[in-house]
Image (spheres, coloured by chain):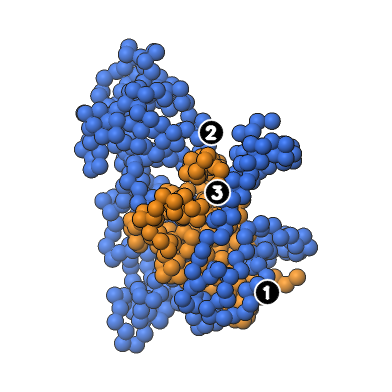
Chain colours: A blue, B orange
Amino acid sequence: MNCVNVQNALWIGQLTDDMVIHIQHCDKCKEEQCFLQTITAQLSNLSVPKPTRSLLPDARIIRASVKKARRRPAWRSMTTYSAIAAIALVVAGGLTWAGHVPDHPADGQTAAHGGGNAAAVSNPFSQQGQSHSNQLATSASTTGIVDVSPTASNPDQCKLIEQYFDKRSATTLKGIKHMTIVDFTPDAKQPNANVILGSFKMEIQLEAGAASPYSNGMNTRFVEITKQEGLWTVEQVASSPFDNGDIGAWNQSFPSSAVQIQGTIMDWKLVDNILMEVTVKIDPTGVKDPTPGLQGGQTLPISIDHGNITPNVKTSFLKQGETVIVKVAQANPAMNAGMTVFHTASLDYLYHLESDGWFHAMDGSKIGDLPHNGSTSGNG
Amino acid sequence: MKDIIQEALQSEQSLTRLLQEIEPYVYRLAYCLIRHQQDAEDVAQEVLYKVCTKLSSYRGDSSLQTWVYALVMNTYRDFLRRRKVRHAEPLAEDVSSASFEEQVDLKMLVDKILTDLPELDRQILVLRFQNGLSVKEVAEVLHISEANVKTRVFRLKQQLQSEFPHGGEVV
């Protein structure tokens, strides 16, 4: 049995019975296990200060939520199958979460706002898969601050917009008695698969005499919804339409925002034969289009973003001094706070092999047409 | 056994109790990600508000834990977006001004690693090794593939091994 495989399995929590037995008889793997346990213990024991206030929602919000839920009979619409599933889960009753249960966030002290003995309460996360067939917010109820109208033609986008406004109830919604997201209309032309631009209509009911940027009755606003790390979220809402110029580089499609550079390989990082980073010294004229933060002569660490694919990339070209052409795009600063690296949003790079004189794509195929200088390669 | 969610949706007391029970987990995760008390409280408060108002839309497709942690991560991302680029603040002490002897202290080292890691790697470290989520659960919470989580865990492994003194032999 390979120690590397066992140690990798340790870190991802996928040990087989054979591996467990192996660890008992292998000093190196035992040491790795101890190391991992130490890391886990240190992280779990990280000191967390006591919250200075109650973090629970206002009692009125809790009351409104219960009232709203009562008006939606969650179990009435349950199908036979989900009812059976619910019964089966209750019978199984397994506690499947092996996470660490904090006595309290504040080093084991009691909650600042009271509410019972933390040690005595059950772990609310211990029940898996409660079967709720309650439909998403398509009720015509008017008890909540924001509702999605049952006539909404695009419930997903409306729901995202609803969530956006829910988070802003304290400020943006000041003076608004009730708001209903009525409809969302996507723009005819969308910038790319990671962005949805469009407009939505909202029915507003203001409190008497309230000052608000919204008016009583129907309002129209424009929205930019973006997908990051597979998650759709409302980026911004405005009273005028958005266009391509409003979209951050990291939300543009990779081909349209990537900058091509040419340079020589200085260094690289491999983890378990997966390429994580390549450091390239950019040729003096290696930046085709002037780009802030990129210049000839610069040594640039390029983080490889593998996205949602299992990396299967040739690494045979990794040689110091090898010529390489790389397309890079700026990382999303929101997701990489403090980092100034550029990374490839896809593994779109070429490498040059001295042995055959060709430029190759990442999968090893030969590339005859060099986009960087417009010439044709193939003869070295 | 009574369904904890159904009960919470039917009574203010039960919903309050559920929120109180979830609160420590939510706040702890928020704090470990943000490492700034006031901001962590704000994020945790927003998450608990969402749990309160969105609980009826929880359909049981994933575990309650995964659903709540996904809310924490989404809210945390919104927080980052609002704050744009911001370096995490060190915990109690200023790491950079500490002596070498102090810096090799394990706790300080863990703090430093948490501060220095790229955002997504930090989220994975906290979810996987602090909160004990499986690779599959981490992937669900972060909306990324399991393969991506594994790749990043392997990278974390290498980084942690190189950061700790004596090749992983901790003191």
Q: Image check: A168 left or right of A244?
A: right
Q: Which image quadrant: the N terminus of chain B?
A: bottom right
The crowding category of the residue bearing disc 2, from other C-alpha atoms within 10 Å (few below 14, some 14 to 19, many at least 20), is some
Q: Is there CB contact under 8 Å for labels 3 and 1?
A: no
Which subunit holds the residue at mark 2? Answer: A
Which subunit holds the residue at mark 3? Answer: B
The residue that disc 3 covers is B171
Single out the mark in the foreground, 2 or 3: 3
Are the residues under marks 2 and 3 on the same chain? no
Which subunit holds the residue at mark 1? Answer: A
Q: Image check: A311 left or right of A217?
A: right
Q: Residue at x 25, y 23 (%)?
A: A374
Q: Secondary structure at mark 1?
A: loop
Q: Secondary structure at mark 3?
A: loop
The residue that disc 2 covers is A272
Single out the mark in the foreground, 3 or 1: 3
Q: Is residue A38 above or below residue A222?
A: above
Q: Is residue A179 above or below residue A256?
A: below
Quadrant of res B25: bottom right
Q: Amino acid at mark 1?
A: Ala
